[in-house]
Amino acid sequence: MRVLVAHNRYQSASPSGENRLVDAEVALLRDAGVEVVEMIADSDDIASGIGGVLRAAPGPVYSPTGVRRFSRLLRETRPDVVHLHNVFPLISPYVVRVAGRHGVPVVQTVHNYRHGCVNGLHLRDGHTCTDCLGTRLGLPAVQHGCYRGSRAQTVPMTIGQVVHRGTWRDGVARYLALTPFMRDKLIATGIDAERITIRPTWVPDPGLAKAAGRDVLYVGRLDEAKGIDRLLDAWRLGGRACGRRLVVAGDGPLAGRVQDAQESDPLVTWLGQVPRERVAQAIADAAFVVVPSRVFEGYPLAVAEAFGRGRPVLTVSGGSVGTIVDHSTGWVVEPTVDALADAFRRIGDDEIAVCGAAARSAYERDNTPERGLASLLAVYSSL
């Protein structure tokens, strides 16, 4: 079997779990004897200034360079399946039509919500927003400048959504959604439910860690979207009395708030942006992992890695992670400071141990490389 994998990498200045997952999946397929042809575009190649903007601007509709390269690879390699990940801005959705003309089925792994939201997050002004779902033209996004805070940059993204609504609806043979929540949001954009397969994130087996540690661990970007400010407020209210330590791994625009918390509270430790090996150790040292995001999220690698280590997860309702975690593998609370603070106060060691064992069982069921490979090959073979 020969598979053409196409992915537009995100800028290296913003560490991307999606980039990591694509690389790991390519390696997984090759180790299983699948021939993989890679078409990788890199947003780092976009020059700064007006030249870079002009090069990227057509991408939501038609990227001349990306389409030419994709067409050449189809002719030269004759793949059995095309597997798309991110196509913005240097590949473009138009490649779905090109694959269709060549009679090659297309699979797309959906890592975010860009089919229904130009910024892919369903977040505006610190709150979840689904105003564009169900609209024909997506005008709310233009009105609010939802893509990078710019109406000028939002316009081509919105035009691309309108032009390619039929491309996505009719041209993709199978969508791979990471969670039931993501499936439902795809259906809301007009995608048929029978063409969506739920396929959770997989990670290499990190090994079951020893008895739970004393840390509450946050891993992610330090910004409002990820809810780090809400987490710090909740910790100040309820965390100091729980006898644990809050460990924060990551960097971002709200790093100053984390640093201030560390300086004022000896039970807060900020690791900064650290290598994956250090994050893995932090998960092993944790009692549980916390995901307080305002955005809907997908299936974060940190959650799959926590489950693999036998660490439960505390998260908030209303998003994708709340459909991964249940009462057996962790805790889902209301998306408020008070609810998180109360959780910090009431979660005890016995409960952590029981949920940790269930988390490891969930990993073995859903998140192993073997499970990831089998589910992917099953989709390819069905097409």
Image (cartoon, rainbow, N blue to C red):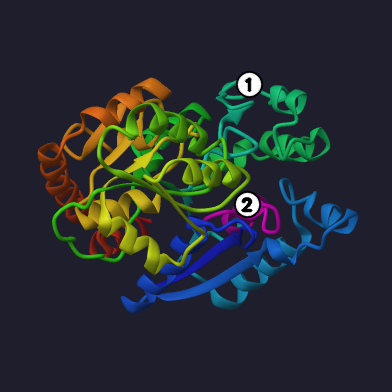
* Foreground pick, 184 / 286: 286
Q: Is residue 96 above or below residue 205?
A: above
Quarter in which the N terminus is drawn: bottom left
> Disc number at residue 381?
none
Q: Are marks 2 and 1 in contact (CB under 8 Å)?
A: no
Q: Label 2: how many residues lie within 10 Å, few (<14), some (14-19) or many (20+)? A: some
Q: Residue furthest right?
A: 50
User: The disc labelled 1 sits on which kind of residue?
Assistant: Thr
Res. 383 in view: yes
Image location of residue 39, percent across then percent down = 59, 69
Of the numbered discs 2 and 1, the one sitting upstream in the chain is 2
- Taking the magenta stretch, the answer to whether it contains residue 92 is yes
Q: Is residue 198 above or below residue 186?
A: below
Say which residue appears at 67% left-offset and 72% top-offset.
Answer: 72
Magenta part of the protein: which range?
84-100
* Foreground pick, 221 / 249: 249
Say which residue appears at 76% left-offset and 23% top-offset.
Answer: 143
Image location of residue 6, percent across then percent down = 56, 63
| Residue under pointer 2 | 97
